[in-house]
Image (cartoon, grey):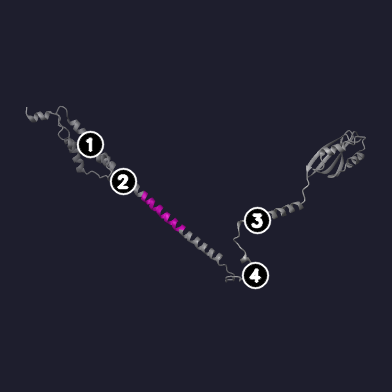
Amino acid sequence: MTAAQCLAQERIWFDKPRYDEAERQFYERMNGPTQPKQVMTTAAVFTACVLILLSKPCLSSQDTGANSILQDIARARENIQKSLAGSGGGSAADYGELAARMKDLELENQSLHKVVQDLRSALSKVESRVSALEKRTTAPTVNGTTPAVPQKAPPTPAKQEEEEDEDDIDLFGSDAEEDEEAERLKEQRLQEYAARKAKKPALIAKSSILLDVKPWDDETDMAKLEECVRSVQVDGLLWGASKLVPVGYGIKKLQINCVVEDDKVGTDFLEEEITKFEDYVQSMDVAAFNKI
C-alpha cells in the first residue's frame, strides 16, 4: 500500500482554514455587518459554494455519497438566497423610512419657522404700543402743546424769616431729648383719648318683656288687676300696651308689655312686686323676653 493510499484512508481535514474563512464570510453576508450591506454577485456565490464543497474533508467512498453533497449544495443555495433577499428588502425599507422621517422633520421645521415669525411680529407690535404709551404718560399734551410748569411764587419776608428760624433748629439733638418729647406726646394723646371716652355716653342695655298675669277666677276685676300691676313704678321700668286674652271657662288673663333696664330691673323683681297683690293676682309668667 502506497503512502497516498494510506493518506486517502485517513480522515484528515487539510482544508479546515479555508473552510473556516468561507463560513465566516458566508455568515457575515447572511447576518449583515454593521456597515452598509452589499449584494453578493453571482461569481461570489459560486466561489462560496466551491469553497464549501472543496473544504469538506476527504472521506472514504463508504462514508460519503452523492446525496450528502447535493444536500449541502441545496442548503448553501437556500441560505444565500435568503441572505440576498433579506439584505435587499431591509435596505429598501430602511431607506424609505428614513426618507419619510426627513420629510416630516422638514415640514415641522417650516411650521416652527412660521410660528417664530408670527411671535416676532406680535412682540414688535407690543413693544411699539408700550413705547407710545410711555411717551404719552411722560409728556402729556393739551391741544397739541405741553402744559406749562407752574412757577413758584417768590417767598415773602415772613416766610424767609420762618425758613431762617427752621435752619437754626438743631436737627441732630440728643436721644434723651427725643425720648422726652415722645413720652410727652404719648401722655398728651392718652389724656385726649380718656377725655373723649368720658364725654361719650355709655350704652344702656334694655329688654322688652311680655308678662302674663293670671287672676283667681272669672269674677276677678281685671281693670283693678291691671291698675295694681301698673302701680309698680321704679327707675328703669316703663309699662306699655296691654290686652285681655281668654284662657278658658270664662277666665281671661292680662297680657302686658314693659321695657326695663337690665342693670336696674329684673324679672324676679317684677314677679315679686306683682304677686304681692294676692286679692287679684294668682301667678305671673314671662311670655316673651327680647333684648333691645
Which of marks 4 and 1 precedes in the sequence?
Answer: 1
Amino acid type indicated by mark 1: Ala
Q: In the figure, is residue 169 to the left or right of 200?
A: left
What is the quadrant of the C terminus in the image?
top right
Residue 104, x across and y down, in percent: 39, 50
Relative to 35, is 163 above or below? below
Task: State the mark number for residue 274.
Answer: none
Which residue has dot 1 on it? 76
Element type at marker 3?
helix
Amino acid type indicated by mark 4: Glu
Residue 131, x across and y down, in percent: 51, 63
What is the quadrant of the N terminus in the image?
top left
How packed is label 1: few (under 14 Cα within 10 Å), some, or many (20 or more)? some
Which residue has dot 3 on it? 180
How packed is label 2: few (under 14 Cα within 10 Å), some, or many (20 or more)? few
Looking at the rendered image, the disc whose residue lies closer to the viewer, 1 or 3, is 3
Residue 176, x across and y down, in percent: 62, 56
